[in-house]
Amino acid sequence: MYKSRWPLTGGLLILSSILLFTSEASHAANWRLSENLSLGGIFTDNVRLVEKGKKSRLIGMVTPSILLHGEGRRARFDLAASLIFNTGIDNPVLPRYRALLGTELVKNSLFFNVTSQAGQGRINPFAAAGSPVVNQTGN
């Protein structure tokens, strides 16, 4: 079962955004916003990776994403967010984001760095840390 960590990561993101946007360094920052749309497809002859009852399928993927980058004299902020839509059987929508903030609060003395990320992954109840996405069949 997927357990959301949004309160923790969302709180850190909001706190870091407040510190960034209220500091003097953010007012002189250069901001850049980039958008991207990726289209792709994968053909597989065994969708479920089973030995009996193999089914072939073309799986399409659409991934819209944005990147916000800001950099000033004493601060830097990066935010990347994307949604992966696929026509596969499991998890048709996979949201993910990553945010980085580094700022110098007091010149040459006090620094503040925050990293926040969230995403959705598969969980294996029989493994301590869940199943890895890569090489699920062990071959």
Image (cartoon, rainbow, N blue to C red):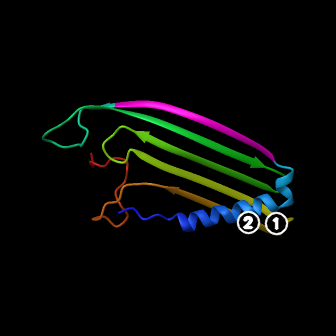
Query: Residue at horizontal 34%, vertical 67%?
Result: 128
On whether residue 31 falls in the magenta region, the answer is yes
104 to the left or right of 11: right
Question: Horizontal and vertical percent for residue 30?
Answer: 81, 45
Residue 67's place in the image compared with 57, above or below, is: below
Q: Nearer the viewer, residue 50 or 59?
A: 59
- Where is residue 107? Give x, y as percent: 87, 65
Place residue 47 in its image quadrant: top left
Can you tell which quarter of the image residue 34 is in? Answer: top right
Question: Which residue type carries mark 1?
Answer: Leu
Check if mark 1's residue and mark 2's residue have beta carbons within 8 Å: yes
Check residue 112 in the rendering and tell me which mark sits there, or answer none: 2
Predominant SS along the magenta part? strand
The residue drawn where x is 55% and y is 33% is 37
Taking the spot 78% from the left edge, 56% from the top edge, the residue there is 75
Residue occupied by mark 1: 105
Q: Quadrant of the N terminus?
A: bottom left
Q: Is residue 69 left or right of residue 62?
A: right
Amino acid bearing label 2: Phe
Q: How many marks?
A: 2
Magenta residues (range): 30-42
Between 79 and 114, which is closer to the camera in this rendering?
79
Tell me the number on the disc at residue 29: none
User: Alpha-carbon distance for marks 1 and 2?
Assistant: 7 Å
Residue 4 x/y as whole percent = 46, 63
